[in-house]
Image (cartoon, helix red, strand yellow):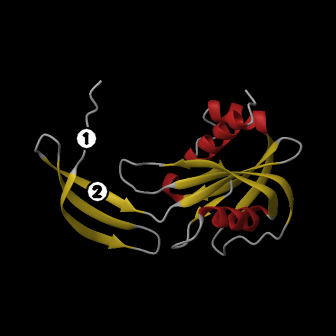
């Protein structure tokens, strides 16, 4: 079987916007067949999502309003990586900031590209178990409801599209597979 490499070569790149979190560029690229195309790209520092699982098999979720989709949704605790920050360190910090919980066990679940069609964002996923109380201290502009949901209910709600956040879907389903829950 012949492996075909599809690659786009950047011809030019124009920075359109640079904010606190993202940078937008418009690139001209040469396609494998020689045609020229335009790509609008968002550079993002990446983030972390944490599936926190209690001893009673409940997953910790937060409900948070997301302006881009104009509604509040259920998500696993998560946050943005600081420049040069280790993803696990970020996950440990975000879990406590958003939920007031710490974990004695913190296992990597891999990573996902939430939307590689236009952004280079990478989200690292972790499973946090053997939870204990820490100190909740959300960011000043962060308003969250914290919920505990039976793990199987979370899976059912994912399958019914009632939970549709990409990092939450991936993290919960990876946890299900890791723990062979279904």
User: In the image, is 84 to the left or to the right of 101?
Assistant: left
Q: Residue at x 27, y 70 (%)?
A: 15
Q: Is residue 148 above or below residue 156?
A: below
* Residue named by callout 1: 6
* Residue named by callout 2: 40
Q: Quadrant of the N terminus?
A: top left
Which of 30/143 is in front? 30
Which of 173/15 is in front? 173
Which of 21/105 is in front? 105
Q: Is residue 111 above or below residue 79?
A: above
Distance in Å between CA atoms under marks 1 and 2: 19 Å
User: In the image, is 24 to the left or to the right of 177?
Assistant: left
Q: Residue at x 56, y 67 (%)?
A: 81
Image depth: mark 1 or mark 2 in front: 1
Count residues near mark 1 (Cα–Cα under 10 Å), then give few for <14, some for 14-19, many for 20+. few
Residue 173 tag number: none
**Residue 54 drawn at (x, y percent):** 84, 48
**Residue 26 drawn at (x, y percent):** 25, 61
Q: Quadrant of the C terminus?
A: top right
Q: Is residue 89 above or below residue 29?
A: below
**Residue 21 drawn at (x, y percent):** 47, 70
Outermost residue toward the top?
1
Q: Secondary structure at mark 2?
A: strand
The answer to whether one can see residue 124 in this image is yes
Q: Residue at x 71, y 54 (%)?
A: 62
């Amino acid at each position: 079987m012949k492996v075909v490499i599809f690659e786009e070569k950047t011809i030019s790149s124009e920075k359109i916007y640079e904010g606190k979190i993202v940078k937008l560029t418009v690139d001209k690229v040469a396609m494998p067949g020689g045609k020229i195309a335009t790509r609008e790209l968002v550079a993002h520092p990446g983030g972390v999502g944490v599936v926190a699982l209690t001893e009673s098999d409940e997953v910790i979720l937060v409900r948070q309003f997301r302006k881009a989709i104009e509604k509040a949704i259920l998500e696993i605790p998560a946050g943005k990586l600081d420049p040069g920050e280790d993803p696990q360190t970020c996950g440990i910090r975000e879990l406590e900031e958003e939920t007031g919980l710490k974990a004695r066990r913190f296992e990597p679940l891999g990573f996902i590209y939430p939307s590689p069609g236009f952004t280079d964002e990478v989200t690292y996923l972790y499973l946090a178990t053997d939870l204990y109380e820490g100190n909740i201290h959300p960011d000043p502009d962060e308003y969250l409801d914290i919920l505990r949901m039976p793990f199987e209910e979370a899976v059912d709600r994912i399958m019914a599209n009632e939970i549709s956040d990409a990092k939450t879907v991936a993290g919960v389903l990876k946890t299900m597979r890791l723990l062979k829950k279904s």
